[in-house]
Amino acid sequence: MKRLRICAGLPALLILLLLINPVESQPASRAAAAEEAYFVFDAPPRKDLFVIKLTDPAKIQKARGIISGKETSGRRVGGLIVKQPACYNAPWSYHLDPQSIEFFDTATEVCDGAMGYIETHLDEVGGALLPGNRWCSWGSRLVREIPAPACNEGVKSFSAASYRRAGLAEESIVAAFGDDLANRTEAATLPLPTTLAGTTVRIKDSSGVEQLAPLFFVSPTQVNYLVPRGMAPGLATVTIRNANGKTALEDTQVLTVAPGVFTANSDSRGAPAALALRIRADGSQQFEPAFRFDPAQNRFVPAAIDLGAETDQVFLVLFATGLRGAALADLRAEIGGGIVDIAFAGAAPGLEGVDQLNIRLPRSLAGRGDVGLTLFADDQKANQTTINIK
């Protein structure tokens, strides 16, 4: 990656803003067990997984034949998108209607789309995107059948930046919500512990490896944790145990990326928790917050960024999470509808789980005022924020 040298020190206010086993059931009968079956498909080269539920005996037999290699036709998966989460298909906010699922070889309809792209554009599905809600993933392939999920609903994990239930990404910061997650409220200091107020978070990945997650913060209803390095992509289980031994489980998925941008108000909207970096012709550098507090609104709003003299270079230093798995070539930023240059992307110095992007602000933005900033990682879109250009 191309690197831009910056000062290591960050304002204390910015740092403060940034750091805030399935149960196996016995089927009633062979006939009842055959009425439902669950299968996983992927769409290489992406590693994301999607779980489907089948209730038609003929389709179940077809799916099993595809996996065993006995069926050589109709190996791709399609169906009608239901814009609601299904407990067996976490972390996606949508699933396929079991009755509509079909297997195909080719499709002439405009119905292809990547899982992550559909997730971040779900409100557009049924219109220009995937008309009629029909999704036929051209690169899809069934990879295996899985047991009926236990559908654990004891806890739900979200990006601590975007508050989207976007799955887990290595070295990303996650906020989990539930009940009785801890006996008291406590915040950690560096180095991050794996036990805080007696609470622990364990993540078991698709290879069966289980790791303890470092903890930022615990309370009875919320736990903020860091997804450990080295988690295998695929279906995963999160187990949160409090000091009394009470556990809360979540079935989710480890994804390559789960982008989220930190915001000044910690609500995923408005001004990003960012800095404007000015580099003058003599090489001197100056940092300024890209947000300011507005007493009238009782919240942070975008601060005007002055692009200055023609000889000045001005960068937006943006802080995010869930990007460690993305190459610089897979990242894209848009400001005011135009693509801008990302000069650097990597781990933010001294901040666990925080990613830093240095975005060059073109002089063509001068005088635009409030403009939207959108970050894309591979096929996923982060939460949109707003900056102000003087």
Image: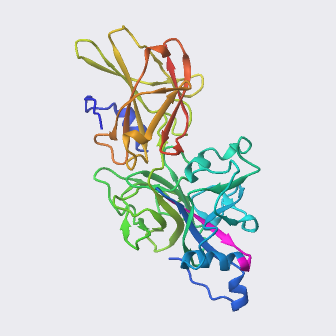
The residue under the point 22% across, 12% down is 282
- Residue that sits furthest to the bottom in the current view: 29
Question: Where's the N terminus, which quadrant?
Answer: top left
Q: Is residue 55 magenta?
A: yes
Whole-percent x, y for residue 69 in the image: 54, 77
Residue 136 is situated, as x and y percent measured from the top left of the image, at: 66, 56
Give the vertical position of 353 relative to 265 (above or below): below
Q: Indicate the colouring scheme.
A: rainbow
Whether residue 218 is visible, yes or no, is no
- In x, y percent, where is residue 171? 37, 53
Magenta-drawn stretch, dominant element (helix, strand or loop): strand
| Residue closest to the eye, 283 or 250 | 283
Q: Residue at x 36, y 63 (%)?
A: 195
- Relative horizontal placement of residue 26, taking residue 331 as reference (left or right): right
Q: Residue furthest top?
A: 309
Is residue 38 rendered to the left or right of residue 224? Answer: right
Q: Is residue 122 visible?
A: yes
Is the residue 335 above or below the residue 227 in the image? above
Q: Foreground residue, 353 or 54?
A: 54
In this rendering, the answer to whether 62 lies above or below 95 is below
Q: Which residues are magenta?
A: 48-58
Q: Quadrant of residue 39?
A: bottom right
Q: Does the magenta portion include 203?
A: no
**Percent x, y of residue 19:** 40, 44
